[in-house]
């Protein structure tokens, strides 16, 4: 889906609906889908044809392969997936996946509202699943730190689509740039810090500033990690190590806790100082220098990238 105002409007619709909905209880036996290195526990909601089910399972297999391009494995060995047939005539033509949200209580996973009338290619090229799955690489940091979680997902949804061949390098950078621009334009509450916005998100609906300031945080952190270590340390590596040591710990996390653990893994004070800087911002910071440092130039709102890209996967631990 093209980046721009339509993308932002869709995401706002997703968030508003997600805040109002709860996951339905299971209505039929769970179907296990082996996605190579993990299982998706599928729960079907609605009247899906046999062909429709096959198509959606093919889509989920493709999504799983894309998500493995972060650091080689899925965030969880077993993921609950609810597929709810979306019947609203108002939004049926908007997207194959008009709404989705992460399930954090009980077995963690994702609730997808889907329109099975769309062809498989439209599902595969839709950004929603890559965004939602990226959330699962870290624990829920709480609504007060929602920028941290949404930022990670907004960053990686574009990175991973590039790595899987769904976007060209320039398309991925363009989508990131366009997102940062939406964050810049969403300046209706200049008196609110990023932390303030998160605490009042239901009232302000300042989703674009929250999401894309968070995405810029992770781009800047990834860039600093690679620069300081001569590309031996990356955000991919930090998330991989965090997944081994900490993701399944039964504890209550917030953004600062996660950032502190990231610093421990990286062996440097990076994520916490940057976190303190970002949560007190009253506007998205100037993102052009960060893009320039990544080898991306901007000309009249269009990106031009060279070979010094952050989008490619770097060497990871193998043990």
Image: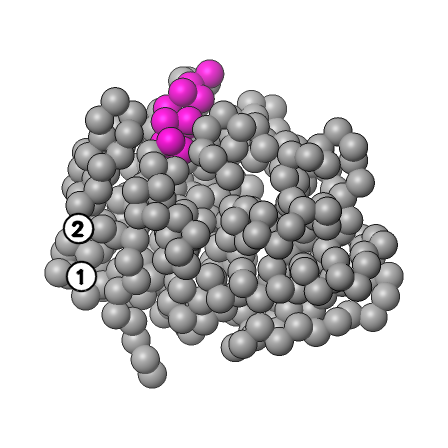
Highlighted range, magenta: 178-188
Please give the name of the residue rendered at 22% of the width and 26% of the height, measured from the top-left corner.
Answer: 299
Q: Nearer the viewer, residue 75 or 277?
A: 75
Q: Is residue 296 visible?
A: yes
Residue 308 badge:
2
Which of the two discs, 2 and 1, sits closer to the camera?
2
Residue picked out by circle 1: 231
Query: Height in image: 111 above or below 87?
Result: below
In the image, 24: left or right of 316? right
Is 179 covered by the magenta stretch? yes
Q: How many marks?
A: 2
Residue at position x 75%, y 29% in the image: 90
Secondary element type, mark 2 = loop
Residue 111 horizontal/vertical position (percent): 68, 53
Query: Is any atom of residue 263 visible in this view?
Result: no
262 vs 167: above or below: below
């Amino acid at each position: 889906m093209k980046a721009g105002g339509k993308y932002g409007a869709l995401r706002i619709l997703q968030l508003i609906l997600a805040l109002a909905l709860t996951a339905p209880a299971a209505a039929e036996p769970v179907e296990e889908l082996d996605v190579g290195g993990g299982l998706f526990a599928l729960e079907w909601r609605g009247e899906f044809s046999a062909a429709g089910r096959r198509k959606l399972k093919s889509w989920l297999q493709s999504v799983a392969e894309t998500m493995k391009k972060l650091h080689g494995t899925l965030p969880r060995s077993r993921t609950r997936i609810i597929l709810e047939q979306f019947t609203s005539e108002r939004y049926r033509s908007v997207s194959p996946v008009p709404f989705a949200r992460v399930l954090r209580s009980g077995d963690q996973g994702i609730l997808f509202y889907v329109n099975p009338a769309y062809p498989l290619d439209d599902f595969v090229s839709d950004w929603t699943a890559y965004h939602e799955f990226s959330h699962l690489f870290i624990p829920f940091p709480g609504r007060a730190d929602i920028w941290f979680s949404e930022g990670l997902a907004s960053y990686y949804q574009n990175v991973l689509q590039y790595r899987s061949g769904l976007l060209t390098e320039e398309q991925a950078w363009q989508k990131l740039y366009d997102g940062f621009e939406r964050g810049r334009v969403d300046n209706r509450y200049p008196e609110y810090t990023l932390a303030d916005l998160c605490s009042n998100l239901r009232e302000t609906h300042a989703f674009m500033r929250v999401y894309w300031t968070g995405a810029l945080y992770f781009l800047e952190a990834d860039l600093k990690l690679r620069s300081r270590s001569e590309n031996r340390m990356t955000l991919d590596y930090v998330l991989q190590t965090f997944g081994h040591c900490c993701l399944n710990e039964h504890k209550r996390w917030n953004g600062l806790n996660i950032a502190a653990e990231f610093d421990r893994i990286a062996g440097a004070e990076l994520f916490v100082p940057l976190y303190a800087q970002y949560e007190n911002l009253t506007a998205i910071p100037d993102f052009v220098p960060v893009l320039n440092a990544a080898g991306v130039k901007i000309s009249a709102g269009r990106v031009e990238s060279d070979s010094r890209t952050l989008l490619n996967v770097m060497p990871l631990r193998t043990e």
